[in-house]
Image (cartoon, rainbow, N blue to C red):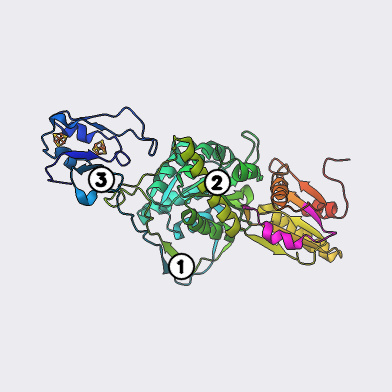
Amino acid sequence: MANRKARPTLSPEICKGCGRCIDACAHHCIAAGTHVNPATGLVPVTLDLERCSACGLCLEACPEPYGLLPEGDEAAAEPTGQKRPPAVEDQPDTRVALPALRPLVVKGTYASAIGALLAGCRHFFGYPITPSTEGAELMAKLLPELDGHFVQAVSEVAAINMMYGCGGAGLRSLTFTSSPGFSLMLEGLSYMVGAEVPAVVVNVMRGGPGLGNIGPEQSDVKLACRGLGHGNTHAIVLAPATTQEMLDLTMLAFDLAFRYRNPVVVLADGYLGQMTGKVTLPDELVRPGLPGWAVHGDREHRPNLVSSIQLSEADLEAHNLRLIAKYERMARSEQRAELYEAADADVLLLACNTPARLAKGAVRALREAGVRAGLFRPVTLWPFPIDALRPLLRPGLRVVTVEASHGQIEDELRLALSHAGIAPPPLAHVRRYGGVLPKEEEIVSRVLGGPERGVA
Ligand code: SF4
Ligand code: SF4
């Protein structure tokens, strides 16, 4: 709008209330607003042009391309009387081939950090917490070498809100945390789900409740799948079981976060975070594009607004309905599971993360003992992979959930069965707590009719 002498008209849905036009006007024609615009949650200025000399200085001062428009700009007019900015095209990701490299032998948090870097993540915000901290340390070492940014925030609350801002700008950000830190991030995650901001949270779960300990526990399944902050929230929850999957699923998490404009949670446990394993690097890395919706700071993206506020009840209900439709798309398209010896199983062990590794050993031992056992491993805990489970549920099948929590995974199974209208098969479980993992022999014993631990 520079150098255009004209009286201004205001675009209240674009004005961000910064006040620069107020300072620019020597005739005091522009005043700070007093009413929140329900469409944006911001407070636009008000105009009183009785003394306006059409000097155009306010038009020059406005940093928003369409915050103020020259009066009579016919080309700008739309039925609403306000010009809408043109939609900004998405700049797509590109993929760059990687040379063949020898496998790495690294711990799980390192594998996850490497996956994030290969997915094009160049921003890390976090607060150290065992047993996730080594991942953050590696990001702190590598990001400056890659023109990236590492910020150790004052708390997990600050870190997640930095991720909100970074994701709002259309950029990829990662945090490593563990159970108590994840609890602190939930409010921010709700804001990000509401504002449809992508980011990846790697939660290396530890023993709880409270401060608990730093042993491996699946203590946050219910938080990640059912309690992701206030409101009707969901995020895809990926549950790795190997060091390789710590890398692969972190890369996938970035793809899913930007595909759906939603945070994604990689839910690991203390063993997976600390365990060293062989990791094969992918064939290609990702050079991220830039989504058209992002508030990126350049002229084209300036009119965008990323916000979770919807002051009108009708608008907020409509927004919820849009989010729920998105959750349904995720639930249809993103279920993932690994099946091991499951096709002819009479007893199906259901486990994820490190307990799935122990359950796999139990399946082998049971098969050697003549028991047709199998393993069903949800790779996505939300959405629960009910479509892969359904064909296995033939009459006579028993299901034994194996987990390091008090039935948080079994609850996900029961909910998935209920939502799918499937009567639950006979269910038993092996559960350990407080950083103790289910042992292979106690899983075998339970399948063979042994008592539930702690039950006479
Ligand atoms: S055109 Fe000039 S006088 Fe009129 S409102 Fe803008 S700055 Fe004030
Ligand atoms: S300068 Fe533009 S964005 Fe800022 S208050 Fe004035 S009209 Fe609004």
Q: Which mark is drawn over residue 66?
A: 3
Q: Which residues are magenta?
A: 382-400
Q: Quadrant of the C terminus?
A: top right
Q: Quadrant of residue 291?
A: bottom left
The amino acid at mark 1 is Glu
Q: Which x, y percent locates residue 244?
A: 58, 61
Helix, strand or loop under label 2: loop
Residue marked by disc 2: 132
Q: CA distance from mark 3 to mark 2?
A: 45 Å
Point out the frontmost of discs 3 and 1.
Answer: 3
Name the residue located 27 percent from the left edge and 47 percent from the top edge: 83
Q: Is residue 351 visible?
A: yes
| Residue 4 image-quadrant placement | top left
Of label 1 and label 2, which has the lower sequence position? 2
Relative to 360, say whether 177 is above or below: above
What is the distance, in whole Å, between disc 1 and disc 2 at their CAs? Answer: 26 Å
Residue found 19% across the figure and 47% down from its top: 73
Residue 99: % across, % down: 44, 71
Under mark 2, the amino acid is Ser
Q: Splitting the image into four quadrants, where does ligand 1 fall?
A: top left
